[in-house]
Structures are given as C-alpha cells and as structure tokens.
Image: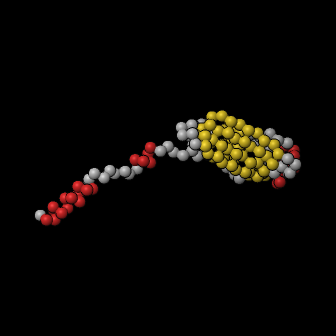
Amino acid sequence: MKKLLASLPFATCLAPIPVSGASGLVDQPLPLKLKIVSRDGKAKLKVARKLPVLISCSKLCDAKVKMTIFTPVGKGSVADAGQLGENKVLTIKFGFRYLKDNYRKSKLKVKFSAKDVETGKRVAKTRAFRFYR
C-alpha cells in the first residue's frame, strides 16, 4: 500500500505535461529547393548555337535567371524573370564560331534566384558549366 501511495504523486506530475512530438514540424512549410542542370545532366555543355539549361523550383516561385558566357575576349549575358512552377529551358545566343574555336577557355555561369510565393523567402543558387565539342 505504501508503494502505491508513493507512486501516485509521481503519476499525477507526469499527466499535465503536454506531449509536443512532431506537431511543431508539421506546421512549417517545406523549404524552397532550386535545381540547375544541363539537358543531359553533365557538368559540361556541348558547343551549339543554343545552349539549353534546365532550371526548376520545388514549389511555385517568382524566379530570376541570369546566364553569362565568359570567353577570352569578353562576355555576353541574357536575363529572364517571371513565375516558375515547372522546368524551364533558357537559351543563350552568342558568337557560335568564336565559341567553337575557344570552347576550352570559355564557361557559362548561371545565377538562379527565386522567391517563395508562400513564405516570401529568397533563395539563390549559382552554377558554372564548361564546354565540350
């Protein structure tokens, strides 16, 4: 009987403590993930008149993309902005003959910045590609 009475206050102390398991994690929205890849998934792009790069967001986002091609003589760039819900292909047109002759010394830099529509957080990602023939 003494053991039963001794364990009663301990049991009543544990009862009012709320259990806060994963309830806090469920309320938070998932973070925005960005992806920049070439069409074939390689780190190098094939020299061509149009250079396709796939960009995507994990959720609906307001996106800004700037693609810059660096060569020994100079650089050229193209920018695009707007809402992005799925994959999008951007192409940059630059001096094809010059790029074909100097592809080993050239690279393409893609800067992808997106703002989550739900939370308003901004995420940025940058990736550089080399070229092959």
Position of 104 with respect to 8 (left or right) is: right
User: Residue drawn at (51%, 45%), measured in percent from left and top?
Assistant: 30
As drawn, 10 above or below 85:
below
| Residue 57 appears in the picture as rendered | no
As drawn, 24 above or below 80:
below
* Quarter holding residue 64: top right
- Give the mark count: 0
Position of 47 with respect to 40 (left or right) is: right
x, y percentage for residue 91?
74, 39
x, y percentage for residue 35?
63, 46
User: Residue drawn at (73%, 51%), measured in percent from left and top?
Assistant: 128
x, y percentage for residue 83?
63, 34
x, y percentage for residue 131?
78, 51
User: Residue drawn at (66%, 48%), measured in percent from left and top?
Assistant: 125
Q: Quadrant of the N terminus?
A: bottom left
User: Residue drawn at (81%, 43%), measured in percent from left and top?
Assistant: 76
Position of 95 with respect to 62 (left or right) is: right
In this view, the residue farthest toward the left is 1
| Residue 32 appears in the picture as rendered | yes
